[in-house]
Amino acid sequence: METITGTIEKIVYRNEENGYVIAKITVDKNEEKLTTVVGKMASINIGETCELKGEWVNNPKYGWQFSFSDYQLILPTSLIGLKRYLSSGLIKGVGPATADRIVKQFGDKTLEVLENDLQRLTEVEGIAEKRVEMISKSWEEHKEIKRVMIFLQSYQITTGYAVKIYKTYGNKAIEKLKENPYRLVDDVFGIGFKIADRIAQNLGIEADSPARIKAGIKYILNESANQ
């Protein structure tokens, strides 16, 4: 498996239901050439930098593409990167002009302000209190998506399943899984007992838990009925 790091330049296709995306990125070492990447992401925005793990495949119609099975978003560090990140449509109420003013005002402290002191955005020309509320809500939603994905992937839940789980439960995904990971069998298409059981073990669910026993019995009965 190979790892590449790059910045999202163009979103060619995105399936909102299953998270499948086709995108063009600039790989750090070669900023003039666009690389096509395909795989599943819970969210994707132009200007975001990501680390992708996967392999190169030669598509008969479209040529070489990087097919990734795992990814991690990396926050931008340069001022140019910050401007592109904020103006990508990621945050409602922030377009290119506003992003430029925010970064000019706060410089390399921009992300720190967004994370810890959003009210300071009123220091930026053209941003009033009402707009701060809109930006704050959008930023918090973005943070929540990242938090859920990091949680799921930290328990060895593959990106493909993590996207499906997030699309099903949204911001309540962590709460739902901690409560009863076996609910995945009924709620998420493509996840059966064996996969749910592996996820449950990674989450530390006891082997003799009532939820596991109930799901296991249901699984055995279904298997017997299908034979």
Image: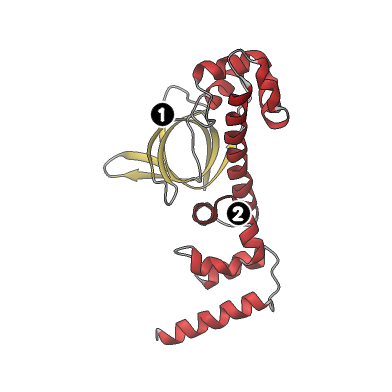
Above or below: residue 148 compared with residue 203? above
Residue kind at label 1, given as amino acid type: Leu
Query: Could you tell me residue 80's position as x and y percent?
Result: 56, 18
Describe the element under mark 2 as helix, strand or loop: helix
Q: CA distance from mark 2 to mark 1?
A: 36 Å
Residue projecting furthest to the right: 116
Residue pointed to by mark 1? 34
Query: Could you tell me residue 147's position as x and y percent?
Result: 64, 45
Mark 1, residues whose alpha carbon is within 10 Å: few (<14), some, or many (≥20)? some
Above or below: residue 72 compared with residue 108? below
Query: Could you tell me residue 212's position as x and y percent?
Result: 62, 76
Q: 35 or 93: nearer the eye?
A: 93
Describe the element under mark 1 as helix, strand or loop: strand
Query: Could you tell me residue 144's position as x and y percent?
Result: 62, 43
Quadrant (top left/top right/bottom left/bottom right) for the C terminus: bottom left
From the viewer's perspective, tell me whether residue 183 is left or right of residue 68. right
Above or below: residue 97 compared with residue 113? above
* Badge number at residue 132: none
Residue drawn at (40%, 83%) of the image: 226
Marks counted in the figure total 2
Residue kind at label 2, given as amino acid type: Lys
Q: 202 or 44: nearer the eye?
A: 44
Whichever of labels 2 and 1 marks the residue nearer the N terminus, that label is: 1
Residue pointed to by mark 2? 172
Residue drawn at (44%, 63%) of the image: 189
Q: 38 or 145: nearer the eye?
A: 145
